[in-house]
Amino acid sequence: MRTLVPALALTALVLFAPPILAPAAAQQGTGAFSGLGSGSQEPIRIDADRLDVFEREGRAVYAGNVVAVQGDTTMRCSTLSIYFTRGDAEAGAEGGDQIDRIECDGPVTILSQDQVATGNRAVYERLQARVVLTGDVALSQGQNVTRGERLVYDIDAGVANIEAGAQQRVRGLFVPGQSQ
């Protein structure tokens, strides 16, 4: 078996770019969520109780108390599954393994500086260039909190949409004098 695991771990989190709360600042590299992904050159550390690589299935699964750290951004979840397609290794970097999707089952928490995003599940879809956080989603910065059932973040556009669930509405609490 090739040394697939380190390449997957780095590629996965470099591609999983969740600048959810501060998209404009994150695109400039100064936002609180610019740590994981967003072209950061800082090393990525993933700790978990277990790692299983299913090379024939094109899947790697970190399980049990997963903590991924890059710079001042930390992501925690119960399971982190990376789905990839095999490329032609002789074609160079562009022909190598490609990450298709990353699924984080939770609870999922993304922390960076004074910002926190939480939900029950997060999915990064490379081809759609989006991150979807579902299940009791909360975005907070200081005392300011926005809640909903589903958050869809368009990476290319830098736009986040929070949607309500069947039994709830999108709710926001903004405290004057706090960060926006």
Image (cartoon, grey):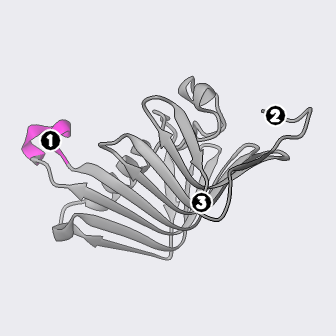
Q: Give me the C-alpha separation between circle 3 and circle 2.
A: 27 Å
Q: Are marks 1 and 2 in contact (CB under 8 Å)?
A: no
Kindly identify which residue carries mark 1.
95
Q: Give me the C-alpha separation between circle 1 and circle 3.
A: 41 Å
Q: In the structure shown, which secondary structural element does the residue marked by tag 3 occupy?
A: loop
Q: Earlier in the sequence, mark 3 or mark 2?
A: 3
Q: Are marks 1 and 3 in contact (CB under 8 Å)?
A: no
Q: Dot 1: few (<14), some (14–19), or many (≥20) neighbours within 10 Å?
A: few
Quadrant location of the C terminus?
Answer: top right
The answer to if 92 sits in the magenta stretch is yes
Q: Position of residue 110 (x, y in %)?
A: 62, 53
- Closer to us: mark 1 or mark 2? 2
Front-most of residues 50 and 170: 170
Q: Give me the C-alpha separation between circle 1 and circle 2.
A: 43 Å
Badge 1 amino acid: Gly
User: Magenta stretch?
Assistant: 89-96
Kindly identify which residue carries mark 2.
179
Badge 2 amino acid: Ser
Q: Main SS of the magenta segment?
A: helix
Left or right: residue 101 compared with residue 89: right
Q: In the structure shown, which secondary structural element does the residue marked by tag 1 occupy?
A: helix
Using the image, determine if residue 49 lies above or below residue 112: below
Answer with the quarter of the image where residue 52 lies.
bottom left
Left or right: residue 21 compared with residue 66: right
Q: Earlier in the sequence, mark 1 or mark 3?
A: 1
Badge 3 amino acid: Gly
Kindly identify which residue carries mark 3.
165
